[in-house]
Amino acid sequence: MAGYQPDPARIKTKVMVEPEIKIKSDYTSNKSDKSLDDQILDLAERGNEMEAITLVRMRYGFSLTESKKFVENLLKK
């Protein structure tokens, strides 16, 4: 099925499609790698795990599950 393009309107009749997620803050702009890693740890330690997970996803390209495990492992140390 090369070139197949799904029809979003048709898909919406079959499954629930969540609205697009908007990120309020861009924690990655103008940050060095070390600074980003420090910010991920700081967010996680302050209880902002969702923001830390979002930053991990943007920084490393991990899936949601991988990012969640990454942050959980940071907090265990």
Image (cartoon, helix red, strand yellow):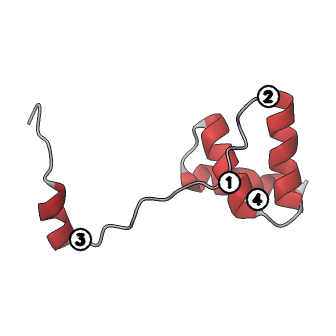
CA distance separating discs 4 and 1: 9 Å
Label number found at residue 72: 4
- Indicate the amino acid at tag 4: Glu
Q: Is residue 47 left or right of residue 61?
A: right
Asked if marks 3 and 2 touch (Cβ < 8 Å), the reply is no
Asked if marks 1 and 3 touch (Cβ < 8 Å), the reply is no
Identified at 20% across, 67% down, the residue is 12
Residue 75 position (above or below residue 61): below
Q: Residue 61: percent from the left, percent from the top?
A: 57, 37
N-terminal label among 4 and 1: 1
SS assignment at label 1? helix
CA distance separating discs 3 and 2: 39 Å
- The residue at which mark 2 appears reads as 33
Mark nearer the viewer, 4 or 2: 2
Quarter of the image with the N terminus in it? top left
Q: Residue 26: percent from the left, percent from the top?
A: 67, 44
Identified at 38% across, 67% down, the residue is 18
CA distance separating discs 3 and 4: 31 Å
**Dot 3 alpha-carbon crowd within 10 angstroms: few under 14, some 14 to 19, many 20 or more:** few
- Indicate the amino acid at tag 2: Asp
Q: Residue 43: percent from the left, percent from the top?
A: 83, 56
Mark nearer the viewer, 3 or 4: 3
| Residue 69 can be seen in this image | no
Give whichever of 9, 68 is nearer the camera.
Answer: 9
N-terminal label among 3 and 2: 3
CA distance separating discs 1 and 2: 16 Å
Identified at 42% across, 59% down, the residue is 20
